[in-house]
Amino acid sequence: MSLEKYRRDILCCTRCGFCKVISTQKQKSWKYNRACPIHKRYGFDAYSAQGLLYIAHEILGGRLNYTEKLKEIVYSCTTCGYCDYACKWVHANAEVLDIILELRAKLVQDGVGPMPNHKAIAENVALHHNPYGKPHTDRFKWMLNETEPSEKAEILYFVGCTTAYLKPEIAKATVKILESAGVRFTMLGEGEQCCGATLWRTGQREQAKKLMERNLAAIKETHAETLLVSCAHCYGTFKREYPKVVGNLDFQVVHVSELLKKLLEEGRLRLTRKVALKVVYHDPCLLGRLGETYIPWEGTVKMLGVREPPKTWLFGSKGIYDPPREVLRAIPGIELVEMERTREYAWCCGAGGGVLEAFPELALWTARERIDEAKDAAADAIVSCCPRCAINFENAIKHEKADLVYYDLTELILKSL
Amino acid sequence: MIEDVVGSENVSDDPAVIAAYHRTEEGPPRNYPPAAVVMPKTTEEVSAVVKICNRYKIRFSCFVTMQTACTEPNMLLFDLKRMDRIIEINEKDMYAIVEPGVTRAALAVECFKRGLQYPAASVVGSALVGAIAKGIEGHGYMANRFSDGRRHGLAAEWVTPTGDIVRLGSLGLGAGWFCPTGPGPGLDGLLTRSGMGIVTKIAVQLYPWWGPRELEVETLIHPKTDAFVYKTRLPKDKFKLLMFQMPGIDELGWEASIKNLADALYEIGKAEVATSVFKYFNWPMMIESCTTVEEAWEKIVSGIYQKATSRMINVFIEACCPEDLEYQERVIREIISEFNGKEAPREFYEDGWEQGKTLTFDQATISILLGISSCRVQKFGGFVSTACGLDSIDTMVRWGMAIPEIRKEYVEKGLITDTLDSYWIVPTEYGHMACTENLILGDPTLPESRKAMEEYAFKMMERNLKERFPDVMFRFGAYGDETVKKLGPLYSNFHLWQMKIKKAFDPNSVANPKFYVIPEE
Amino acid sequence: MIDKLAEIVGSENVVTIDEALEEFSRDHSFVKPVKPLCIVYPKNKEEVKRIVRFANEHEIPLVPVSSGPPHLRGDTVPREGGIILNFSKMKKILKIDTRNRTVIVEPGVTFGELVPELEKHGLKLNMPLLPRASKSVLTSYLEREPPLMPKYQFDYVDPLLTMEVIFGTGAEFRTGTASGPGSLEEINADMVNPFGPGDVKYFKLLSGAQGSFGIVTWAMVKAEVAPKARKIYFIPFEKAEDTIEPMNRLLRYGVMGSVADEIFALNNFNLAVILADKWPDDFEALNKSLAPWTVVLCLGGYRRAEERIKVQEKCLMDIAQELAFEPTPYLPGAPGKEKLLMQLLSRPWEREPYWKLRAKGSCAEIFFLAPPSKVTQFLHVVPEVAAKHGCDVSSIGGYIQPIVQGHAYHVEFDIPYDLSDDKEKEIAQKVFMEASEELIRLGAFFSRPYGAWADMVYSRYAEGTSIIRKLKDIFDPKHVLNPGVLSII
């Protein structure tokens, strides 16, 4: 892959502005009509998919030199993929997010990127198999006193670094739920390493690739048919990025919310305790609009951008939007209300794309925007399915001193069991 | 100094920032990279920066949606998106006061909540309302009933090219925002795109809305492509979209068929019905209903759209009550029938989407209401437009007669797409006027196709001049001082007056002079 | 000078008779009389150009007059002497275009001449309320007189379209798509687009300028389809304030957003003046019997005319029910006058004297614009000021006209007075000045600053004044066109 491959896609940008604002029909107010966090935050058009595509165009043409500012612009994007969905809804002939990721890869390749904190992540992953630099041996500390996984099972629960190290309560809740429903699962244990999300998204392709290959082999060894994740970041990475590197996965990737839905439908989970809360559900980017299986395409691009053979575009429509909502509605006492920007056009939490590490102030600002939206929906709590969203929202709630609580979906289920 | 005014984070000359405001392929005379971009927040900041430009003779321009804006090198570009407040929506007086960074869709949505509507032009919903102040109105789909942006601007707050803050219209006398014209001469006649400074606030005329305060939008998934398709549900007893097939090119020939269609448009205008009525260009209409480029291409190649839509009239009725709707529909059907038209088959509506035959889903409705079609027709990555200045329906018809001949060679060489009839006619003000535009569909990413599209457009312009059609400069302003000086004598020497006006109001020649006319020394 | 002018227009078209000069030195406004040097009657554009150039060479003011008397607003009184340019001989109806519903007229074409011509073609004008028959159509629209049918008015300059104008330099110019390319014969357009050419909207600059930027030698205005069926309704009210909300609503509802074609409100005085046949008996009876205020609205039917009227009636009743008013096809206080009124509304005022002068022979008009939310705040001012000065308030005419599709209102009070009675005149003038000042202070928008209003308005609008002066220096650098009429130029 190279940026050059996207030259034509880049030229298709007509500056329509839809990567920056909510799809027209879905706008409900002036207050929440913006879609791109960096564009709203910084104002200059460079901070948007359109801007990044124009920058890519100039770089390809040899007309733009690398500067600190350029690097900052390229890396401030949370890679939430709103622009990808919006542009395809309008145009359907450009892979906008892939172009942005490719641009980052080029910066790394040319020795310019990534940001220093991203390099630190790479070092941590290399040494400790997680981005946080915490000891690998502590990865499963949360499992003390918890159910032991089976040696072998159809379901392999992939915990993920952020959950394991920073939000272990999610893992604990997940495991308890599985136990309660009588679901057998296995885990990689010490064999589990970072899924590679942040490495990939910050353009550190070489290392990410090696990690992905290694993970794939480890998963294969377990003969599990289903990879269960409770982290949206892991989910989106396995589904959308892994196939680009390692080809088709020969296992299913399932998010815990999908499994929860199934278990509820089968009556294997009984939620009897009331949880009296008015909640909004935040759609994590990598579970929703970026939660589809990547479909490779090879062929020719003809006049007008017509692909031959026809390309299957990922519009984001097969992402996971409803299962978490259905699960929430099944919890007695929960009142689910919606924020204005939701589902495929949800506002990003701000933590993705390495932004949490490189630009914490931006990540916080982005999350605070979302907190305001939750408050405007008169919610008591904001619920989601991603530990990175969790960290960022909890930080924002603290900063705002908001009268709001964050819950992971699994935590609420646990409360109701 | 500019940093002192707006803050260092709101002005930049970094090449990476600049890159987003300019594209190399779109060359002179209208597209240069700015030297710096500034994003003011208030009128006072705009005024202060303009004064700095005057002091140091820095030429400036103002950014507008979808168009790059620097007509010469080393300009300062104002990006007004931080000025994005809807200051007031006055329900009683039916206007909204907006800053130039407000997008059309955001305003429309807020208006619906208050029982009002803002009749957007076809330009995208992401486009800036403030464009109205610049005279960029786009074609109003609903111009039959509401006219278009040309008429909608009310009182304004204006930073002149010398940096003075002027209040125009009723605002100037502290009488509020409702009237743009007066006292005495209509000074709002001076407002135009950046050649005459920057409008920092403007009131825009709104109209009654009898629909839901919040649009009900259903999300569907396309059965073949899995794309999102948003269907807006409007009450059926007050809103109706109708598509009519008039006798086509195959039946009557190019000329007779378009004249017949024009006759029908005139009658509809005279009957004073139909909020929106227009002859649509067929390939953009087809695009409205497609979710992928491949789907659109299939339809182009099949010929179905060319044949079935060669002469179509779209009508959108907004009624205050069911009786109103029924009456308007009866009148429209009567007129259509008089001119031998018939309603398009049901499958052209949303009923046909599974068979791939639909022409609309509800996109036509929502394009009409919120103006998003312009970006949807970008699906192929761009088009080149050629047009005639606004005038009568008949003038638009005569203008369009050249299309088959001029496009022929480019279609035969495969440089542009054979979409047959790609021009539309939008009647305005009960058919008193109309505008048109011909969208040339080629592949702008392929140099030979791009060249062909531009040549085609140029030939239309030349032919405009030769056959004395009103030039598109009415719509887009001057093409640059050299062209304008050449054409000016043909148009009552307007360029001389424009030069004098320019000199009087922009003595230091800093306000985007090349997009206006540079005063002779 | 007279000889030179005679060379241009012919000696029979230059008048220096004192009596005639006296007539043009004054009008019914309070503008100080100034006698012109002569009256010149050009017959065509070329003569106008030559006169303008002549005026430039000799720095002689020109005051364009297109309408016959009476003149009420002071715009035809030469502030600084000079030549009256009387267009009564430029009276060609140059073109009636039934397909595009436009008409091109020279400045001397009056409503009395044009309306019956248009009727023959099944067309109507969006007329102001009962203009005198000798009123110039071109001037009426150029000066933005409020028309009776707000639904046709898309902005404040509508229905004025393209124009040919001779600027103060003597240069010829045409606006909009009349500007070119090429000569009028060559232009491949119907010339209906008023905007431009280029970036400036000249037609807006010329509108409301009272002839101080250029002299319009022809103008195209919109005509509309004459209805196939009409029905008139009346809604009586006790107070002026009560007329506003019903009119607001009736312009936001109905087929294409307007129940009515013509819609306006008159007080009993004005309505009685208009309807009275024998004077003063009929007038006095009507003045007593008519409701203090009456909203008048005409429903019009085009295609499927009766059906349309039926729908409009239904819409009218919907609003009536909601706002608890009672529209009636009979004129309350004057049953039987309905047909007469409908006829009157389609025609200019053909009787003598002009209806505004019927009561006392002269009249001071006070009019301004206001948005719907603020109209009622201004309605008390003129009556209060009049009462303060001992005027009989019941003898003041009132007229409220919604314009621009209901986005604003033209509010007018007509104060009749006897010109030959100095005391009455003095009081009328005091009321005029004081009420005007007070209204401006309260925020009423005097968008057409005639006579003394020019000073009142521009003294409060320095930024606008500076712009108008710049434009004046461009279009009329020698300041020959109606100097002083806008007080600042």
Image (cartoon, coloured by chain):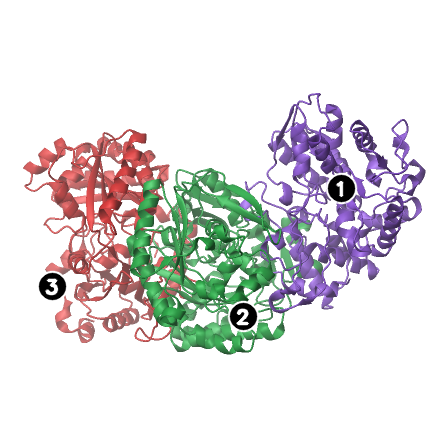
Chain colours: A purple, B green, C red
Q: As shown in the figure, which amino acid type bears the numbered disc 2?
A: Thr
Q: Are marks 2 and 1 on the same chain?
A: no
Mark 2 vs mark 1, foreground winner is 1
Q: CA distance from mark 3 to mark 1?
A: 102 Å
Q: Secondary structure at mark 2?
A: loop
Tell me the number on the disc at residue B417: 2
Give residue A20's position: percent from left, percent from top: 62, 50
Which residue bears the numbered disc 3? C17
Q: Residue visible at 31% across and 61% down?
A: B339
Instruction: Answer yes or no: is residue C252 visible.
Output: no
Q: Residue visible at 83% across and 60% down?
A: A109
Which residue bears the numbered disc 1? A254
Q: Secondary structure at mark 3?
A: loop
> Dot 1: few (<14), some (14–19), or many (≥20) neighbours within 10 Å?
many
Q: CA distance from mark 2 to mark 3?
A: 74 Å
Give residue C16's position: percent from left, percent from top: 14, 65
Give residue B19's position: percent from left, percent from top: 67, 61
Q: Are marks 2 and 3 on the same chain?
A: no
